[in-house]
Amino acid sequence: MQEPVSVPLGEDWPEIRESVRRICADFPGSYWRDLDRREAYPAEFVKALTDAGYLAALIPEEYGGAGLPLRAAGVVLEECHNAGCYAAAAHAQMYTMGTVLRHGSPEQKAKYLPKIAAGELRLQAFGVSEPTTGTDTTKLKTRAVREGDHYVINGQKVWTSRALYSDLMLLLVRTTPREQVAKKTDGISVFLVDMREAKGRGMEIRPLSTMINHNTTEVFFDNLRVPAENLIGEEGKGFRCILDGMNAERILVSHESIGDARWFVRTASKYASERIVFDRPIGQNQGIQFPIARAYAATQAADMMLRKAAVLFQAGLPCGEDANVAKLLASEASWQAAEACMQTYGGFGYAREYDVERRWREARIAQIAPISTNLVLAYIAEHVLGMPRSY
């Protein structure tokens, strides 16, 4: 019989929330505007979160981490975004733990986790997407071939964010060609790549300039040799390993969307109450009130679904449906709130000094990454509702 689980209501983890708010107070909009202009990495912000122990939130205490549940880590990200900061530079070190902690060997954990927890190493890169395959992960072309006590890797990844600022990369490759496996998800393996040794020795990283400051790159592998001991889990069974990481990623990134939505709703409400046009606050008009109120309602609903997904993940129960639904609702709530805020500000929303246009741009990515809205809907249609597979 399944053990009962409970979903917390109200402001859970209040001590963490207050601590994160204090950290974020040192990183106002001007800090993020400057980084956005220069397409620079928020090194100071990442260091502050690291020093506070939050990037080691999910690492067990025996390895020097905080040993917190996924929900607590999500709260850290939510409060960062609620405060107007942008935590994308930090979140990968949290969600990759879904794979490393559940499928890494004792030796791998002992070797890397203490240094990650201490801030000596960064695990911020996740190499999955490729230029020709996109979200069709089973068709990825990056190959790893066993040669003695090493694997030789060749291929290319794209949209590998923070690769230039990470020491380690979680890398998904094919160790057996797709045409040689019975199930298309077989023959895929995961490696923990030490990028300090790989750069210039078979790994090349090129930055990509994008609409938002996401520090993303494309990565090329040319006969990169990786020790066999860096294989996570069993060879050919890596797809199952990354599912834990992907569910964790969707849950954690959804917390950021909730934080974004709360920032937009609060910012729009305040401006609507203070902005006077035609001798009255614009917030007195229902045309302004209703979109903001709807965004708030959507945010509250998404938050409840997200809390449920986090609880199920932590309990080790199936959470694919809940993680995907939470991702869908949270990303749509943040975009709904972003649109309401931009419309409320009108022309001033385009002025960089108010941070609305920057955060509007940042919120839009949640509709696409780490999984697009359409693929979530396809997943629900097939795996939840039993309709024929569409792709």
Image (tube, helix red, strand yellow):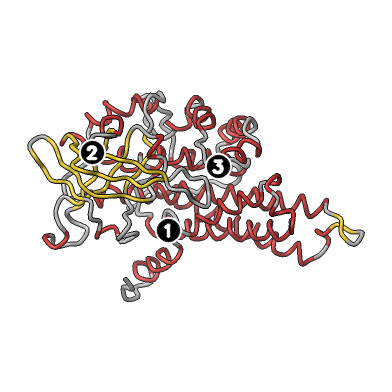
Work out which quarter of the rendered image holds the C terminus and state it: bottom left
Distance in Å between CA atoms under marks 3 and 2: 32 Å
Name the residue beneath numbered marker 3.
86
Q: Neighbour class for label 1 at 10 Å: few (<14), some, many (≥20)? A: many
Q: Which residue is mark 2?
A: 202
Label disc, if present, on residue 324 of the rendered structure: 1
* Residue at x 41% of width, y 34% of height: 165
Q: Are marks 3 and 2 in contact (CB under 8 Å)?
A: no
Residue 220 quadrant = top left
Q: CA distance from mark 1 to mark 3?
A: 22 Å
- Is residue 218 depicted above or below 325 in this figure? above
- Callout 3 amino acid: Tyr
Residue name at image x 25 percent, y 37 percent: 104
Q: Going by the picture, which residue comes out furthest to the right?
A: 279
Q: Looking at the image, which is closer to me, 381 or 27?
A: 27
Residue reaching furthest to the left = 148
- Residue 249 image position (x, y, % from top left): 41, 48
Q: Quadrant of residue 377?
A: bottom left
**Residue at (34%, 25%) from the top-left corner?**
114
Mark 1 or 3: the one toward you: 3
Q: Residues within 10 Å of mark 3 (few under 14, many from 20)?
A: many
Relative placement, left or right, of 184 versus 45 is left
Q: At which x and y percent is residue 125?
A: 36, 41
Residue 366 image offset from top left, x and y in percent:
50, 55
Residue 234 placement, left or right of 287: left
Please state which amino acid type lies under the numbered disc 2.
Gly
What type is the residue that disc 1 sits on?
Asn
Count how many numbered circles sit on residues in the image: 3
**Front position in the image: 12 or 179:** 179
Q: Nearer the viewer, residue 376 or 125?
A: 125
Residue extending farthest bottom: 388
